Amino acid sequence: MFVRDCISGDGIWGHKLILTDMIKRIIFVGLFLISFHSVFSQNQTINVVVIGAHPDDCDLDAGGTAIQFAKMGHRVLFVSVTNGDAGHFNKGGAVLSKIRKAEAEEAGKRFGVTYKVLDNHDGLLLPDLKVRSELIRAIREWKADVVIGPRPYDYHPDHRNTAIALQDAAFMVIVPNIVPETPALKKNPVFLYTEDRFKKPNPFTPDIVVDITSVFDQKIYAVSAHQSQFFEWLPWLDGQLENVPKSEPERLKWLAESRKGNISKEAKALLFYWYGSKAGQVKYAEAFEICEYGSYPNDDEIKRIFPMLGK
């Protein structure tokens, strides 16, 4: 009725012109809405939680990826499950935990992330209900879309037990009656394992590999905030304390050389999958394996939650 009322004396041609114009407008509006939805989806904030056993574990395992998330405007939380109060040769307890916490806070500023250190003793961690609840609470409060942490195969009991506690928390983050004082998530996040060198019982199998070449120097600078670890404790363990450089530029160079890592054959193949021809220029990368206890993303979902891929 509306179309007929709008037609003048142009007869059949008037009908055709008006209908054509209406169709064009409908198509234009449809394309605009699709485009708007796409842009809106791309601009949605991604909430990322990285979990490690000690202050500095998150930094090493996913620091470059975290920097890129932060630079793109997304929210990243580092969680150290222990306070690091045992990792030194001539100090410990409350004195050391205070140092470790201050170092973690400085590292967080350099990464552009929030750094949270839980008050569990270093070297004594167990995957009990208390620790599980702490992780559930942290993941929920951050409204995590992505949770990254270690696999349960490692030389250090704190690393293994952090991984077990995280696996146990994976499904429970969406169960309202567990840790009921913190509202449950509506959807299970994507849980990812960080890369390690352990082969038994199962070797690490990468699914996502992120090029961190452009932010590697920033990662090393941020990691260097953990001075008690990288310039004292770890060199002491390796019998290299006397070889630690004195000046900051030399220390950064020394640290970068020891932490540059190698890109595995499997990771290189995935770099070409995610980055195409740009993969040939990648010098440094971080790899992640999808954990089956969380949501299992397809390739489009991976690109959405890892918007730096291919860039």
Image (cartoon, rainbow, N blue to C red):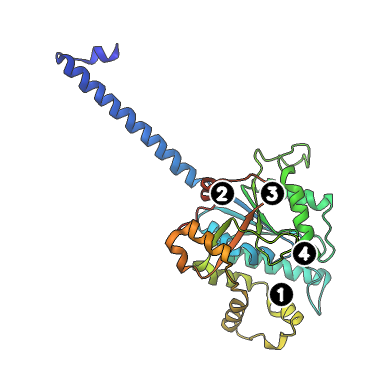
* N-terminal label among 1 and 4: 4
Q: Position of residue 251 (x, y in %)?
A: 61, 81
Mark 1: few, some, or many residues within 10 Å (few <14, many ≥20)?
Answer: many
Name the amino acid type tagged 2.
Ile
The residue that label 2 is drawn on is: 46
Could you tell me if residue 28 is visible in this image? yes
The residue mark sitting in front, 3 or 4, is 3
Residue that appears at 66% across and 42% down? 188
What is the CA distance from the residue labelled 2 to the residue labelled 4?
Answer: 27 Å
What is the CA distance from the residue labelled 3 to the residue labelled 2?
Answer: 13 Å
The residue that label 4 is drawn on is: 83
Residue at disc 1, secondary structure: helix
The residue mark sitting in front, 2 or 4, is 2
Could you tell me if residue 118 is visible in this image? no
- Quarter holding residue 159: bottom right
Report the quarter where the C terminus lies. bottom left
* N-terminal label among 3 and 4: 4
Mark 4: few, some, or many residues within 10 Å (few <14, many ≥20)?
Answer: many
Residue at disc 2, secondary structure: loop
Q: Where is residue 231 in the image (x, y as percent from the top left)?
A: 69, 79
Depth order, front residue of 244/169:
169
> Would you say the residues marked 3 and 2 are in contact, meaning their CB atoms lie under 8 Å apart?
no
> Would you say the residues marked 2 and 1 are in contact, meaning their CB atoms lie under 8 Å apart?
no
* N-terminal label among 2 and 4: 2
| Residue 58 horizontal side relative to residue 87, left or right | left
Name the amino acid type tagged 4.
Asn
The residue that label 1 is drawn on is: 229
